[in-house]
Amino acid sequence: MSGIFLARCFLSACQALGAVIIPIYLTVLGFSAFKLGMLFLAVTSASAILSTAVGVASDRVGRKPFLVGIPLVVAVAGVILAFTTNPVVLFIVIPLSSFGRGFGAGAGSVTFYQPAEAAYVMGMSEPTRRNQLFARLTFASSLGSVVGNAIVGSMSARHLHASSALGVVRPFFLISTLLSVMAALAVARISEEPRVHPPIRRQIMPVRSAAILRRFIISNGVTGLAIGIYAPFISYWFFKMYAVGPGEIGRLFAVANIVAGISSLGAGAVARRYGSVWTVFWLRMGQSALFFAMVYAHHFLLAGLFYIIYVVGQRVGIALRQSYVVAMADPNERGAVVAISNLPSEVTQASMSPFAGWLIETSGLIAPFLVSASLQFLNGFLYLWMFLRHRPEDEIQKTPESTRAINT
């Protein structure tokens, strides 16, 4: 299992590095906010398709081929990006690798790698340890993000210039390639039991998990709307709002990931005390309030402080939601359930990116964040309503008999 955590750390470092550099790098090359939104649309759409394919295929052929192969794809992307500024190539390579998709300090997420990873972790763990393991996985992601952010934080140039941009960022793209290769090597020796396919599993779509999957699809679709309208532009927002460069943004994200990574280790304890669903609900309420505070802070350090607190809540919520999804899915359908439950989020994120770019150009830098805060507030209540009566078995066993619910 240590190889999985190490691989997540390396791959998250790679993704976090790209998330700071690429939006700013492309802006320097002349990409408008709307054009960036179109690129993020392509990235998220490709991620949605690939995540679904990986989730379904990993249930059939195993998780390991994807855990090894996907980092190698990202490694190739890093090499290509280090030697070209051709917009056509950028619009092909970045979506197919999901490298540099944005999402600020939360960019350590590993996109279409995650369905195979989550299914593998759940298959190798005891139910009573699932929240703890996913918290550790989130911590590994935070730790890797700190490394990636710190690497970017070493960039001395406050501002990039179009004529020299590729030369400045080339070493960082090559470092991302090295990190991705190390991620692949970390999981190269993990073991996995052969897949068993009972007759019912001849269907591609999950059957036994269909009822709970429908709820995930609705909830995650709304989550994607809230994320898609701000997250791809968070580095761009700090860059434009406060005239800070990649170095300052990288250092802010590094601090955010250090604090969030430590906090994520407590996710399991919080969930045991209050339940996964109630915890996620209150986190979303807090995140919504923090967004309103952040966009009106009017100072980089104060806005950064609010953002750090926001990321702490985000990271704890991610660990609990991932753990909850795989716990509620049938063991033979976990990869597909993780992928398909994430698909609506990817689709709605993709649909919001061009709109967010247009909104920035027509209404200013603050507007997308206010819309996102409102959507997160509403989605907290939706999440509570849809999942409070549907709890993992280990949480039901610790709940008084009168409040137990049957998962349907």
Image: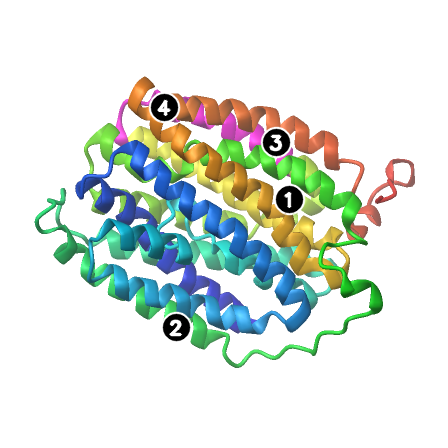
Gap in angstroms between the C-alphas marked 4 and 2: 39 Å
Gap in angstroms between the C-alphas marked 1 and 4: 37 Å
Badge 1 or badge 4: first in the primary sequence = 1
Residue at 24% over, 39% down = 31
**x, y (%) of residue 338?**
64, 53
Looking at the image, residue 403 lies above or below residue 11: above
| Residue 296 among those drawn in magenta | yes
Gap in angstroms between the C-alphas marked 1 and 3: 12 Å
Q: Which residues are magenta?
A: 280-300
At mark 3, the secondary structure is helix
Which is in the foreground here, disc 1 or disc 3? Answer: 3
Give the residue at mark 4.
359
Looking at the image, residue 227 lies above or below residue 95: above
Residue at 35% over, 26% down = 358
Badge 3 or badge 2: first in the primary sequence = 2
Amino acid type shown at disc 2: Met
Give the residue at mark 2.
182
**x, y (%) of residue 286?**
53, 29
At mark 4, the secondary structure is helix
**Badges 1 and 2: C-beta atoms under 8 Å apart?**
no
Give the residue at mark 1.
270
Q: Residues within 10 Å of mark 2 (few under 14, many from 20)?
A: many
Gap in angstroms between the C-alphas marked 3 and 4: 29 Å
Q: Is residue 237 visible?
A: no
Count numbered badges in the picture. 4
